[in-house]
Image (cartoon, grey):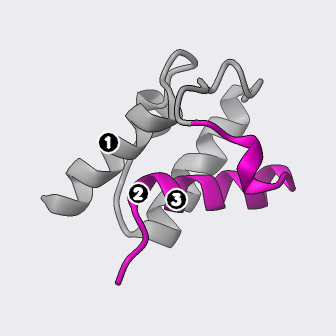
Amino acid sequence: MRAAPYDQLVEILARLHDTPADRFTPEATFADLEVDSLTMVEISIRIERDLGVTVHDSELRPTLTLAGTAELIAARQAA
């Protein structure tokens, strides 16, 4: 069984930031996490590579929450 999109996203972010997964919350935004534009590109690449869906870095706005990002991933996985 595949993990939920939120859990998959948190796993990507935890590896990228070398931070424990429990440090992330669904309500956190990319701005809260101090994610810069270069890191947004890296997150986009890892989502595509690890999860098999395309989420463009331009869709990953600083105000987007992790829950919102997970919803975007889930919609793409369902398509």
**Amino acid bearing label 3:** Asp
Q: Nearer the viewer, residue 43 or 29?
A: 29
**Amino acid bearing label 2:** Pro
Magenta span: predominant SS is helix
Q: Reading the chain from its start, which is encountered first: label 3 or label 1?
A: 3
Q: Is residue 7 covered in magenta?
A: yes
Identify the residue at image location x=64%, y=59%.
12
> Which label number is shown at residue 71?
1
User: Cα distance, mark 3 to mark 1?
Assistant: 11 Å
Circle 1 crowding by C-alpha within 10 Å: few under 14, some 14–19, many from 20 = some
- Picture quarter containing residue 70? top left
Q: Is residue 14 covered in magenta?
A: yes
Q: Reading the chain from its start, which is encountered first: label 1 or label 2?
A: 2
Specify the quadrant that holds the N terminus.
bottom left
Please provide the residue range marked out in magenta: 1-25
Q: Are marks 1 and 2 in contact (CB under 8 Å)?
A: yes
Which residue is labeled 2 in the image? Answer: 5
- Describe the element under mark 2 as helix, strand or loop: helix
- Describe the element under mark 1 as helix, strand or loop: helix
Which residue is labeled 3 in the image? Answer: 7
**Residue farthest toward the right in the current orientation of the protein:** 18
Q: Is residue 56 above or below residue 73?
A: above
Q: Is residue 21 left or right of residue 75?
A: right
Specify the quadrant that holds the C terminus.
bottom left
Q: Position of residue 74 (x, y in %)?
A: 28, 53
Total numbered labels placed on residues in the image: 3
Identify the residue at image location x=54%, y=54%.
9
